[in-house]
Image: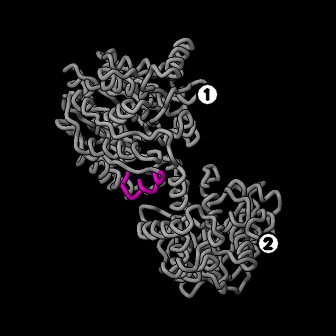
Amino acid sequence: MRLEDKITAVTGVGEKRAVMYNKLGIYTVKDLLYHFPRGYVDYTTPVLLSDTTPDENCVVKVRVDKKIRPAYIRKGMTIYRVVASDDSGEIVITIYNSEYLYNSFEIGKEYVLYGKITGNLLKHEINSPLVLKADEECKIQPVYHLTEGLSQQMLRVTVKRALKALDSEIYEPIPKKYLLENNLSSLVYSLSNIHFPKDMNALSLAKNRLVFDELLVLQLGMSLIKTNSHKATGCEMKNIPIDEFYKSLPFELTNAQKRSINECIKDMCDVSAMNRLVQGDVGSGKTAVAAACGYFAYKNGFQTALMAPTEILATQHYETLKNFLEPLGLNVCLLTGSMTLKTKNEIKRKLAEGEYHVAVGTHALIQSTTEFNNLGLVITDEQHRFGVEQRALLSNKGNNPHRLVMSATPIPRTLALMIYGDLDISVIDELPKGRKPIQTYAVTGKLRERAFSFVKEQLDEGRQAYIVCPMIEETDLDLKSVQKYAKDISQKQFKDYNVGLLHGKMSADKKEKVMVDFKEHKIDLLVCTTVVEVGVDVPNSTVMLIENADRFGLSQLHQLRGRVGRGEYQSHCILVTDNVTEESKTRLKILSKTNDGFKISEEDLKLRGPGDFFGERQHGLPSLKIADMAENTKALSMAQSCAKEILSGDFNLSKTENRQLKQLVDELFDKKIDLN
């Protein structure tokens, strides 16, 4: 049996059971060994029955006294009972439908049980416990993620058999030098002890090694992508001053904006293509930076394309760039899917002939029929909403053009370096002068009517407002509740105002119409889902009320809050929640205290961890099985320096000693990215 063999190579796994393993993403022996436990049951310190706490999970060591005859309750339901005891009392073990487990108990033999103990001081009971023979050598047992048809015991037995594959081959992808330098255990030892640890120290050593491996492979992959993306550009530019752009602005740019522009210009004058992320909080002025870069490209004779994830956002960018650039002689166009064929064809013709200097659009920009005359700069907004392939298609419209990515999702810098490992990073960490901080209040549902009164006061002053309802799963039930909510308040509390509704299930045309109506103040109050998280600017909107605020992450709440406070008026955000747990209060208090997105993201990461923080595979980061970048900062630092050293001596991992590492990189990135 070898690691690359199919899972059916393990004794006891036939074709039928292999299908169950496939559901867990396990196809090979190696996949099984890397299906790490989600937790462990420590049987090393059992307590006496008399010392157990009712309704809590406990470990007890008992001797089997007798086995009661099975009770056949109905078809498909058999109950088995075993009576056992220790020096302090007696316990009844109840087993449902598992004749195998019932038969495994031998009278007079000792067993260690783990489960919830019920009953009282005189009578103890335990239902469907995890069972271990008292003489079992391994007293710390793994607990795995399962699927229907597989039990913990089945998986444990199969993993034990699969571990024998490590006896037949030397599997050590990391050069010995780095293992010694970083005090890491061998991979064979680590894989054995992550599943069946000899003790807690062995488990710690195993986990340290496997966390390091995962972070090292991730770092190597990101570095290789970065090297690959920094190829020579056919759009090298000269450092031509853009003073007239600065003079034409009706406001003074912040130092952070100027710094970001200078970093971009420096990159665009290099022989390698720019790959830069401009990361800034909501309202920090990223579009002004994009406009400056577009103007610099124009001065060098190149076109610019800006791709946004939605038509609403594309239209907003189009209007902003038009205001910045058309007074300076540039022609800016908008290209979206909802335009008529005639309009699209006319715009595409002018783009191909070079009449338009800047094109703003959605996926329509990457269609095969869209051609550019001399594309030199590609800008993507909210990059994580596009796939790798979509971004590549846009870049392929030119001769390896410069690439600029904008993101309003503040991410702690250490994490940003990992997630955007293929990009250089510019951070806009100050807001434009005169911007009033949004006043944020967290209240319980008891104060909802008072909050509604405050919203009405704002509307009566001629302002506009949002009410955001959580629609996390986007199910029909969620949708109906949002629609009902909008209908109820439009007929009751807000019957004297124009109430609009916006949600993700609406067609692009309908969404567009609602947002235009809101912008033109045909709608006073917009009830919406998180579809407004990245949306159009309405400077007249001054209050946002968020229902069930505890259901959102802090970073998402901060993004939503950023939809108000875009104009001259003082703006407000009201977080309504009926979940008054300490954790919920702590989280919402953070939001009430600061408007700094970077501080909020740090706290969000601490509270929720990277998995929840980024959502399902957001930002294109490969999913990690054991490493946690928020917790394993020391391992991350070790992995980064190790990756740097390895690549300095072997820039594409082609040497024999790095062959297995290269294979791991390919596997982690699903071989979707060419790392050669």
Label 1 is placed on what type of residue?
Ser
Residue drawn 60% across and 54% down?
675
User: In the depicted view, which residue is nearer to us: 544 or 567?
Assistant: 567
The disc labelled 2 sits on which kind of residue? Met
Marks 2 and 1 close (CB-CB < 8 Å) = no
Q: Position of residue 205 (x, y in %)?
A: 52, 78
Colouring: one colour
> SS for tag 1?
loop
Which residue is under mark 2?
1
Question: What residue does disc 1 label?
Answer: 368
Residue 463: which quarter of the image? Answer: top left
Relative vertical location of residue 437 with respect to residue 122 in this rendering, above or below:
above
Work out which quarter of the rendered image holds the C terminus and state it.
bottom right
Tell me, yes or no, whether the highlighted magenta stretch contains residue 211: no
Q: Image quarter for residue 19?
A: bottom right
Position of the N terminus by quadrant: bottom right
Q: Of label 2 and label 1, which has the lower sequence position?
A: 2
* Circle 1 residues within 10 Å: few <14, some 14–19, many ≥20: few
Horizontal side of residue 114 vs 73, given as left or right: left
**Where is 53 relative to 590, above or below?**
below
Q: Is residue 417 magenta?
A: yes
The residue depicted at 65 percent of the width and 85 percent of the height is: 137
Boundaries of the magenta span: 411-422
Query: Would residue 332 be found to the left or right of residue 390 on screen?
Result: left
Q: Can you give x and y, in whole percent of width and height, for residue 49 in the image?
A: 53, 80
Q: Quadrant of residue 16?
A: bottom right
Closer to the eye: label 2 or 1: 1
Residue found 19% across the figure and 35% down from its top: 252
Can residue 487 be seen by looking at this rendering? no
Coordinates of residue 557 in the picture (x, y in percent): 35, 42
Q: Residue furthest top?
A: 342
